[in-house]
Image (cartoon, coloured by chain):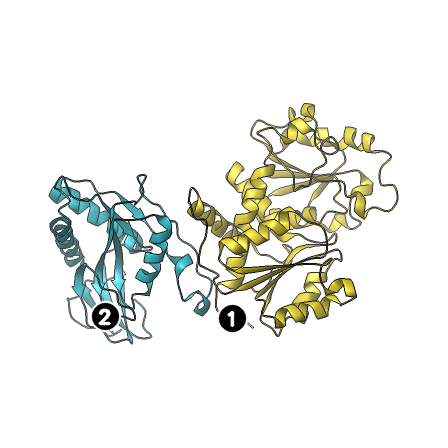
Amino acid sequence: MRHLLGTETLDAATATAVLDTADTLKHTLLGREVRKLPTLRGRTVITMFYEASTRTRVSFEIAGKWMSADVVNVSAGGSSVGKGESLRDTALTLAAAGADCVILRHPASGAPHRLAGWLANTGASVINAGDGTHEHPTQALLDAATLRERLGEIAGRRIAIVGDVRHSRVARSNVHLLTTLGAEVVLVAPPTLLPSHVDTWPVRVSHILDAELPSLDAVMMLRVQAERMRGGFFPSAREYSINYGLSEARLGLLPEHAVVLHPGPMLRGMEIASAVADSPRATITEQVANGVHVRMAVLYHLLAHEEEM
Amino acid sequence: MAPRTRGATDPAGQRELLSAGDVARTVARMAHQVIERTALDTTDAAPVVLLGIPTRGAPLAVRLAARIAEFSGVDVPTGVLDVTLYRDDLRRRPTRPLGETELPPDGIDDHLVILVDDVLYSGRTIRAALDALRDAGRPRAVQLAVLVDRGHRELPIRADYVGKNVPTSRTEEVHVQLAETDGRDAVLLTRAGETA
């Protein structure tokens, strides 16, 4: 694997190999005083974040450091991006400075794909850490790792993704990855919050959350992304919350074994009730912890093998 | 596969160095040597732990522990130490899958750790294992047991217990087969380019 740009092109064998590596890394580091492996000593990893992020950036930085890579963080605010430098020139500068891997978060869908093209001759790998409303592959991988841990396996499970699917790169990456791994995915959202070509996705669509809950193995709640919305997608936050929010009463409709995922950041009281977010059925902090191991595994699969040009 | 005469070279260029019986006797002799060297059946001896290096070091460690228990009455804990993350050749090969590391419940601190592997060659795997051990704890001492030592060391490393010394050329390959991983016990020597 040279780049990780999305889950749409990720085959089941590669995805499973990454998840297995993440699992082994987690097990290896468990209970250790020194959580540091020498595997990526001397490799340089640069995170380039053109959009706000807490968990993804921190998680990538910790993952790189635990593998002994040198991690450099570039944010759009404090760099020459503010002076008007293009993404291409910034990326080529970073590659020339010795980056083995560039991790990019960008508001434009497809930016990491362009970056991978520009860096083709440099040998550097590109990881998509979220591009616009397109993909966020490491989030989907950490969700899959969490589901595997809680449910045993993903194949044959029914998983609903609920809420603002239209603006969600997390939803798109999860749809592709979870169906590749053999799960049945149901999208639950008001029609205005579904993407325009949802009929081409390998999913079933529903508009009524209560009808789906009793037959689910997992439910993934999405944040309503007000920052990407121009215009009214639903009448009011209160109405949205009543129809599509996961309340305590709705939690009771889920089967006993079913779990609740949320990629964060979450808006308590909007798409998820506070008591649900804090219940043992919710996997939100596990997802963050697994995020570090999954990103270590991705770095291992991208950087710890012979050159492929 | 048809039984082979020991030492004979078949048309495929493959020679059997140890038969199933030889493997069993060799492991038994190594068990006696471990008991003698470590005095593990005496009261003031340091507690011994056997750590196998995947793939074939792991079942070898279990077999060695079984023989030690049989001959001395002492149950020696065993574990598995995967060294992939500590290798110095990761950038020279396709992606290696990681193996599981499974340390005994009491850990390895202040124990005499005996690393167990099938073939000792360049010594680089053992170098990686020593680094992995440092992250796993602080043993009182570390020793090395190998079924076959084929020479060509690239590092100042030697084994404390050797099943069989085999002078080889670098163009040859030594393949250890164990019932647990390969369906039968044998040690084979293959000329380069051929596979066992």
Alpha-carbon span between mark 1 and mark 2: 30 Å
**Front-most of B162 and B25?**
B162
- The tally of labels here is 2
Q: Are marks 1 and 2 on the same chain?
A: no
The chain identifier of the residue carrying mark 2 reads B
Labelled disc at residue A106: none
Mark 1 surroundings: few (<14), some (14-19) or many (≥20) residues within 10 A: some
Task: Point out residue B146 in the picture as x, y percentages from the top left corner.
Answer: 22, 59
**Front-most of A152 and B3?**
A152
Q: Is residue A184 above or below residue B157?
A: above
Which quarter of the rendering shows the C terminus of chain A?
A: bottom right
Q: Is residue A47 above or below residue A268?
A: below
Q: Write down the colour of chain B.
A: cyan
Mark 2 surroundings: few (<14), some (14-19) or many (≥20) residues within 10 A: some
- Residue for badge 1: A307
The chain identifier of the residue carrying mark 1 reads A
Question: Which amino acid, mark 1?
Answer: Glu
Residue at the spot 50% in from the left edge and 58% down from the top edge: A300
**Front-most of A120 and A8?**
A120
Q: Is residue A225 visible?
A: yes
Secondary element at tag 2: loop
- Residue for badge 2: B151
Task: Point out residue A99 in the picture as x, y percentages from the top left corner.
Answer: 59, 67
Residue A144 falls left or right of residue B185: right
Q: Write down the colour of chain A.
A: yellow
Q: Is residue A177 visible?
A: no
